[in-house]
Image (cartoon, rainbow, N blue to C red):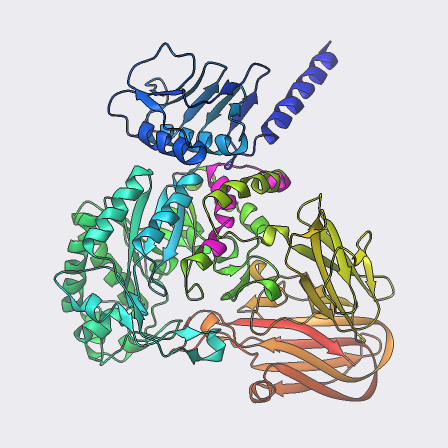
C-alpha cells in the first residue's frame, strides 16, 4: 500500500512540474497549478473590478489596452458580469510580504494580496500570461507566489554616458516586468555630474560636460574630439522617482565620494588637496584627484546631500566609497594634520573617518548609507550597509559583523561584461558573464550561517556604461541577463533548472519584441566545447542553445549556410583550421556566426597542470586553455584568457613523449585600466624525464613589454617532454594607477611549443 501511495505521489508531483513548465513565467512562481477546467476568455466586454482609490487597476487597464487593444470598463464593486478581472486586498495575507495569489476560472481572474506591491506583481504575472496565451484564452490555474529577497536591484551608470528621461523610464519598465524593486541610479563620477544642485550650479554647468570621450577600447587611447554631456534637473528627478514609485520601485541615488570626484573638482577645485585646476575626465578608469576630507569639503558634501536626500524617499543613499587612491592624501598637509589630530593610523582610516562623518549626517536626516565594499577599509561605519562587488569576501565580512549586504560580485552581476562569443559581440570592457553564469548565482555565500545569512538583503546587476554610448546598447547588455537575475532573486533554489528557464525565456522574446527591446540574441549562439583526443588532436563539440535548431558549419573559412556541412557529431581538428558555424531553423539563420581559428603546435591537446587555479571570473576552459589552439582576443579580453588575481602562474606541460623543441611562445596581456599587468618575470625550464630540468630561461618585464605580450623563448633544438612556465604576478598595484593597492591581475593564454 505504501509503495502505491509513493508512486501516486511521484505521478502527481511530475504532473505538477510538467504543468508549471508549460507556462513561461519569469520569475517562475513558487507554486503554479494548471487545472482541468474551462479557461477564461478575455474579451472587450470583460470588466475590471477593484476597490475605490486602487491605483493598480488603471495600470492593468493600460496593459490590456497595449497588449490587446481593448479599453475595458472599471467598476469599484463586484459586478454581475460573468467575465471579470478582480483585484482584492486580503488582510489575511502577510502584510509585510509581497505575496500575491491568482485564481483563474471560466468566470473571472482574481488577483489578491495584502498590499499594493503584491497586487502589482500579480498584474505583471497576468501581463506575461496575456502575451503567452495570445488567443486570449487564459487556462484555469492557481498561483501562490512571493519573493525571497527584499533587495532585487538593477544599477545604471549615467555618468559615463547620459540617457534621457524617457530612456530611464523604459529601464524602469524593464525592472517592473521582472518584479525587480530597486533602481540604483549612479549619478556622479569622474566623467560627469548628472544631477542639478541649486546651491552649487557649476556642478552641472561645468561638471556635466566633458570636452571629448574615449572611443574603442581603453588600451587604444583614442578620443572622438566631440563635447559630451547632460544632466537631470531636480524636476526631472522628481518625475522619474514618481514614475518608479508607480511601479513599486525604489530609486537609490549614488553620489560618489571620496573618490571618482573629478567632475565635482573641475567645478569646485577648492575641495581637492591640490587646488587644481581640473577638467572633467575624458578617460575611463580611476583617477588620483579625490575629495580632500577636511571640514570645508565635508560641509560642501553635506549641503549637496541636503538637496539630494529630499528628492529620494529611499531609506538608503549610496555614497560610493570605491576605488579611492590615497596618493594625494599622503602628500597633503591638511590630510596629514587631520590624521594626527584624530589619532588615525593611516590613510585607510582617514577614508573610514570621512565615511563615518557622512554617515552620521545622513543618519541625522533619517536615512542610512550604503557603499561599495571598500568602505570596509579602515573600519566600517557603524550603521552602513555594504554592496559587495570585488567578489563575495566583502559581503561575507560585513554580514559576519552584522551589517546588511547587497551582493553584486563582478563574476555574476556585472552586465558590462561579454555575454557571448567575443568575436561576434559588440565591444565591452572585458570579462565573460553569460546568461547561465548569472542564473547560477546564489546571493547567500555558503560561508555564512543561518543568522548571518539574514543580513543578505539581496543582490543587483550592475550596468557600467563606458562602452555603452546609447540606450540600445544598454538594453543589449542588460537583457535578458536581467531576467535571469530576477529569477535568482525571486527565489530559485536550483541552478539545474537553467534548461527550464532557457525554454521559458525563448517564449519571452515575443513580449520583448512587442516592447521593442534591443535584447541580446547570445542565447541563440552556437557554442564550441573543446577537448583533447587521446592522440593530442582537438575535438570540437558544437552546441545550439535551442534544441530544435540545426547547426551547419564550414572548415575552409567560408560563411555557413543551410547547404553547408550539417553538424551531427564532434569535429576532429588535425591541422590549422578556421571553423565557422551557425544555427538554422527552417533554413533561416538564427545565430551569429561562430568563428574560431585553431592553430596546431607540439603542445596542442597536451596535459597541463597548474599550481594555482585561475579566478572563477576568468577560468575559461581551465588549464587546458593554455594548449587548446585558440588565442585570446587582445581587444576583447574575456573568456579565452585565464586570469589570476594577485597570484603567480606555475604551469607544467606534458607533451606526452619526447619531442625536439625550438621555441616556446607565451601569450600574456596588459590592460592597466582593468588592473591587468604583464608579469614582472617569466621563467621557462624543460626536461626529458620530469625530474632533471635544464636551467631556467628568464624573461624580464622590459622584454615582455618590448614583445607586446607575445613572449618567445628560443631553445637549442632541445629534446623535451616536460615544460615548466612560471609567470610572476606584479603584486600590489602601485599608486597613481587604477586599482592602486589592490592585487594586480595576470592574464595568460596559449603556450605555443614549436
Image quadrant assignment for residue 422: bottom right
Image quadrant assignment for residue 750: bottom right
Q: Which residue is depicted at the point 45% across and 80% down? A: 221
Q: Which residue is depicted at the point 51% across and 48% down? A: 480
In the depicted structure, whether residue 271 falls above or below residue 617: below
Where, quadrant-wise, is the C terminus in this rendering? bottom right
Residue 557 drawn at (x, y percent): 75, 69
In the depicted structure, whether residue 514 falls above or below residue 232: above
Residue 674 drawn at (x, y percent): 47, 70
Q: Nearer the viewer, residue 228 or 396?
A: 228
Residue placed furthest toward the left: 199
Residue 690 forms part of the magenta stretch = no
Q: Nearer the viewer, residue 487 or 692?
A: 487
Residue 489 forms part of the magenta stretch = yes
* Residue 495 seen by the camera: no
Left/right of residue 490 with respect to residue 289 in the rendered view: right
Q: Which residues are magenta?
A: 475-499
Residue 156 drawn at (x, y percent): 38, 55
* Residue 327 seen by the camera: yes
Q: Nearer the viewer, residue 92 or 185?
A: 185
Where, quadrant-wise, is the N terminus in this rendering? top right
Left/right of residue 557 with respect to residue 21 in the rendered view: right
- How many marks the image carries: the answer is 0
Residue 382 drawn at (x, y percent): 27, 51
Q: Which residue is depicted at the point 57% across and 53% down? A: 521
Dominant SS of magenta comes to helix
Amino acid at each position: 500500500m505504501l509503495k502505491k501511495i509513493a508512486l501516486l505521489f511521484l505521478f502527481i508531483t511530475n504532473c505538477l512540474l510538467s504543468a508549471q513548465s508549460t507556462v513561461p513565467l519569469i520569475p517562475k512562481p513558487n507554486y503554479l497549478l494548471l487545472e482541468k477546467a474551462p479557461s477564461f476568455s478575455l474579451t472587450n466586454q470583460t470588466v475590471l473590478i477593484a476597490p475605490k482609490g486602487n491605483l493598480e487597476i488603471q495600470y492593468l487597464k493600460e496593459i490590456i489596452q497595449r497588449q490587446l487593444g481593448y479599453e475595458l470598463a472599471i467598476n469599484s464593486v463586484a459586478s454581475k458580469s460573468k467575465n471579470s478581472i478582480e483585484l482584492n486586498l486580503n488582510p489575511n495575507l502577510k502584510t509585510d510580504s509581497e505575496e500575491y495569489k491568482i485564481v483563474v476560472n471560466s468566470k473571472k481572474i482574481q488577483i489578491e494580496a495584502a498590499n499594493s506591491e503584491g497586487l502589482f506583481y500579480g498584474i505583471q504575472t497576468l501581463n506575461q500570461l496575456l502575451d503567452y496565451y495570445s488567443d486570449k484564452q487564459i487556462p484555469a490555474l492557481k498561483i501562490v507566489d512571493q519573493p525571497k529577497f527584499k533587495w532585487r536591484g538593477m544599477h545604471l551608470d549615467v555618468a559615463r554616458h547620459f540617457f534621457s528621461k524617457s530612456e530611464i523610464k523604459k529601464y524602469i519598465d524593464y525592472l517592473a516586468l521582472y518584479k525587480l524593486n530597486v533602481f540604483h541610479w549612479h549619478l556622479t563620477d569622474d566623467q560627469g555630474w548628472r544631477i542639478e544642485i541649486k546651491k552649487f550650479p557649476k556642478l552641472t554647468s561645468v561638471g556635466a560636460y566633458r570636452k571629448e570621450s574615449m572611443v574603442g577600447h581603453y588600451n587604444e587611447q583614442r578620443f572622438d574630439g566631440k563635447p559630451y554631456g547632460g544632466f537631470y534637473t531636480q524636476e526631472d528627478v522628481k518625475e522619474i522617482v514618481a514614475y518608479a514609485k508607480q511601479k513599486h520601485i525604489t530609486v537609490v541615488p549614488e553620489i560618489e565620494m571620496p573618490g571618482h570626484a573629478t567632475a565635482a573638482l573641475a567645478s569646485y577645485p577648492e575641495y581637492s588637496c591640490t587646488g587644481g585646476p581640473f577638467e572633467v575626465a575624458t578617460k575611463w578608469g580611476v583617477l588620483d584627484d579625490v575629495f580632500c576630507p577636511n571640514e570645508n569639503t565635508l560641509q560642501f558634501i553635506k549641503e549637496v546631500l541636503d538637496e539630494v536626500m529630499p528628492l529620494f524617499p529611499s531609506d538608503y543613499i549610496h555614497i560610493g566609497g570605491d576605488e579611492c587612491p590615497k596618493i594625494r592624501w599622503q602628500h597633503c598637509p591638511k590630510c596629514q594634520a587631520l590624521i594626527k589630530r584624530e589619532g588615525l593610523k593611516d590613510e585607510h582610516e582617514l577614508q573610514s573617518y570621512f565615511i563615518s562623518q557622512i554617515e552620521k549626517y545622513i543618519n541625522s536626516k533619517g536615512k542610512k548609507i550604503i557603499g561599495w565594499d571598500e568602505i570596509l577599509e579602515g573600519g566600517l561605519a557603524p550603521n552602513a550597509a555594504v554592496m559587495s562587488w570585488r567578489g563575495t569576501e566583502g559581503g561575507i565580512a560585513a554580514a559576519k559583523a552584522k551589517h546588511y549586504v547587497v551582493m553584486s560580485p563582478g563574476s555574476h552581476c556585472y552586465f558590462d561584461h561579454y555575454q557571448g562569443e567575443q568575436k561576434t559581440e559588440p565591444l565591452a570592457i572585458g570579462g565573460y558573464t553569460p546568461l547561465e553564469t548569472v542564473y547560477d548565482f546564489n546571493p547567500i555565500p555558503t560561508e555564512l550561517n543561518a543568522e548571518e545569512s539574514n543580513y543578505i538583503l539581496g543582490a543587483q546587476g550592475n550596468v557600467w556604461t563606458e562602452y555603452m554610448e546609447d540606450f540600445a546598447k544598454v538594453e543589449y547588455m542588460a537583457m535578458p541577463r536581467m531576467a535571469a537575475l530576477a529569477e535568482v532573486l525571486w527565489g530559485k533554489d536550483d541552478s539545474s533548472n537553467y534548461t527550464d528557464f532557457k525554454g521559458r525565456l525563448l517564449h519571452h522574446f515575443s513580449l520583448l519584441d512587442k516592447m521593442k527591446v534591443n535584447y541580446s540574441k547570445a542565447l541563440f549562439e552556437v557554442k564550441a566545447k573543446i577537448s583533447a583526443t587521446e592522440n593530442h588532436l582537438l575535438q570540437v563539440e558544437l552546441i545550439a542553445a535551442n534544441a530544435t535548431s540545426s547547426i551547419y558549419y564550414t572548415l575552409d573559412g567560408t560563411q555557413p549556410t543551410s547547404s553547408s556541412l550539417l553538424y551531427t557529431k564532434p569535429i576532429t581538428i588535425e591541422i590549422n583550421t578556421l571553423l565557422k558555424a551557425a544555427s538554422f531553423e527552417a533554413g533561416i539563420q538564427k545565430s551569429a556566426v561562430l568563428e574560431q581559428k585553431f592553430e596546431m603546435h607540439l603542445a596542442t591537446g597536451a596535459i597541463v597542470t597548474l599550481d594555482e587555479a585561475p579566478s572563477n571570473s576568468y577560468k575559461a576552459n581551465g588549464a587546458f586553455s593554455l594548449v587548446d589552439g585558440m588565442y585570446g582576443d587582445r581587444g576583447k579580453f574575456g573568456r579565452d584568457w585565464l586570469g589570476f588575481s594577485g597570484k603567480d602562474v606555475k604551469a607544467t606541460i606534458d607533451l606526452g613523449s619526447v619531442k625536439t623543441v625550438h621555441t616556446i611562445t607565451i601569450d600574456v596581456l596588459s590592460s592597466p585600466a582593468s588592473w591587468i599587468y604583464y608579469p614582472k618575470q617569466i621563467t621557462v625550464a624543460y626536461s626529458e624525464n620530469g625530474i632533471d630540468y635544464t636551467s631556467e630561461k628568464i624573461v624580464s618585464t622590459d622584454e615582455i613589454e618590448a614583445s607586446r605580450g607575445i613572449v618567445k623563448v628560443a631553445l637549442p633544438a632541445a629534446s623535451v617532454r616536460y615544460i615548466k612556465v612560471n609567470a610572476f604576478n606584479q603584486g600590489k598595484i602601485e599608486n597613481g594607477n587604477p586599482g592602486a593597492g589592490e592585487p594586480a591581475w595576470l592574464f595568460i593564454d596559449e603556450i605555443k611549443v614549436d
